Image: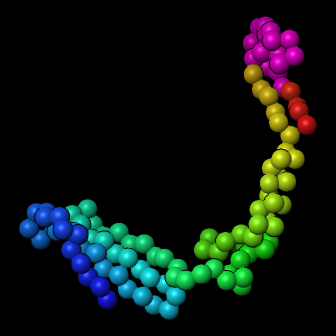
Amino acid sequence: MLQASLGFKGEPGVSPTLTTSKSGGTTTITITDVEGTKTATILDGEITEAMIVDDLTHNDSNKPLSAKQGKVLKGLVDAFPTFYSGTTDPASGTGANGDIYFKYEE
């Protein structure tokens, strides 16, 4: 375990401290200061092919999505129609009496 002072002098007893710990392929960084303790967890090493998710049903926020699935998502977003809504007719540029117009674009 590494422990170091950040070099800032605070009120007595509340000078910031930083600690790190390592367990398997994970490093945890903890910073404690006058506002409390904050922790960050970092996965060590390279991303292996086995770590990459190649589907759109996984719910693991710690795994990267494959480029193939990113392309699938982009295709779904690009295929979604564009809707216009407002109080002005998008075709004529006019509106009256509080009418609301909708335009569907493909």
Judged left or right of residue 105, residue 52 is left
Q: Over which residues does the magenta segment extend?
A: 87-102
x, y (%) of residue 44?
52, 82
Residue at figure coordinates x 77%, y 15% from the top left: 88
Residue at figure coordinates x 18%, y 68% from the top left: 7
Position of residue 77 relative to residue 104, above or below, is below
x, y (%) of residue 11?
10, 63
**Would residue 99 be seen by someone viewing this image from the given angle?**
no
Q: Which residue lies furthest to the bottom in this view?
A: 24
Queried whether the magenta region covers residue 89, the answer comes back as yes
Colour scheme employed for the rendering of this structure:
rainbow
x, y (%) of residue 98?
75, 12
Position of residue 82 relative to residue 88, above or below, is below
Q: Residue furthest left?
A: 12
Q: Is the magenta stretch mostly helix, strand or loop?
A: loop
Q: How many numbered callouts? A: 0
Position of residue 44 relative to residue 68, above or below, is below
x, y (%) of residue 10?
13, 63
Quadrant, the N terminus: bottom left
Queried whether the magenta region covers residue 15, the answer comes back as no
Judged left or right of residue 25, residue 22 is left
Residue at figure coordinates x 84%, y 26% from the top left: 102
**Would residue 38 be seen by someone viewing this image from the given angle?**
yes
Residue at figure coordinates x 31%, y 71% from the top left: 31
Quadrant, the C terminus: top right
Q: Quadrant of residue 85?
A: top right
